[in-house]
Image (cartoon, rainbow, N blue to C red):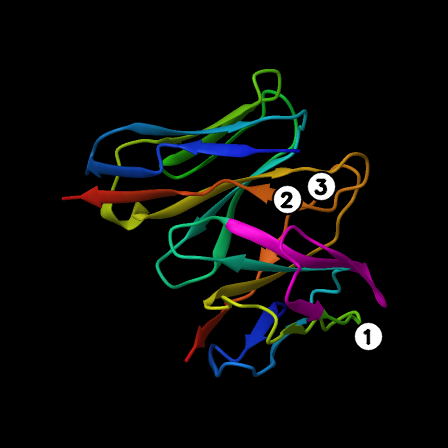
Amino acid sequence: ELKVEQNPLFLSMQEGKNYTIYCNYSTTSDRLYWYRQDPGKSLESLFVLLSNGAVKQEGRLMASLDTKARLSTLHITAAVHDLSATYFCAVDGSQGGSEKLVFGKGTKLTVNP
Amino acid sequence: DGGITQSPKYLFRKEGQNVTLSCEQNLNHDAMYWYRQDPGQGLRLIYYSQIVNDFQKGDIAEGYSVSREKKESFPLTVTSAQKNPTAFYLCASSTPSVSYNEQFFGPGTRLTVL
């Protein structure tokens, strides 16, 4: 059974600082997705990582995937208040045809002035 | 505009009552999904459907039922058998392939038991 673990679950950081969120998963997969959720809102797709070594960047966020280590990272550079949200990683848990995603519990990020 | 709509936004249920949550998409996606989110938790899969007239149970299907009579629609019924239904319900859709299954989410329905 595929398990997905994110850490930390809570992250409070100052504006301008850098930090990394980690997403570990338990079985082989080379398809991983990052989502953002604002309080009371739905999930918004951030990054799609589909191969070992994949790296995607958007503004102050950069995501990478290491399928051999079963690890994805979401790096935050020079954080700003607008990045405050909960970030989820999700791993494709199917063999062959894609069906189900298994989500981590999320990392609640608070960026303080 | 293409997208996923869910209604209602807020729903209140009395004990012993069945309620139905609506999910509609005009993205021409084949697959649709229902997730439940509890406070401070990740998403848990309730049901999913890859084609019309077919659906599979997810990890927490007990107390829920679905139908998929049209490609665009995937309603979820929360039955009285679901003892703790208060949660945020999210519908998603995708066009899965062997190598790709990015899911897109609707705005959600917040269900509260009175």
Callout 1 amino acid: Glu
Chain ID for label 1?
B
Task: Identify the residue position indicated by label 2 in the image.
Answer: A101
Q: Residues within 10 Å of mark 1 (few under 14, many from 20)?
A: few
- Indicate the secondary structure of the residue bearing disc 1: loop
**Does B10 appear above or below B41?**
below
Task: Check if residue A30 falls in the magenta segment.
Answer: no
Q: Within 10 Å of the Cα at label 2, are there few (<14), some (14-19), or many (20+) other Cα atoms? A: many
B26 shown above or below B49: below
Circle 2 sits in a helix, a strand or a loop, which is it? strand
The C terminus of chain B lies in quadrant: bottom left
On whether residue B53 falls in the magenta region, the answer is yes
Q: Are marks 2 and 3 on the same chain?
A: no
Q: Which residue is mark 3?
A: B100
Q: Chain of mark 3?
A: B
User: Which quadrant: the N terminus of chain B?
Assistant: bottom right
Q: Mark 3: which amino acid?
A: Tyr
Q: Is residue A6 left or right of residue A27?
A: left
Label number found at residue B69: 1
Q: Are marks 3 and 1 on the same chain?
A: yes
- Left or right: A19 in relation to B7: left
**Magenta span:** B43-65
The residue depicted at 39 percent of the width and 39 percent of the height is A59
Separation (CA) of disc 2 from disc 1: 23 Å
Q: As displayed, is residue A37 above or below residue A104?
A: below
Q: CA distance from mark 2 to mark 3?
A: 11 Å
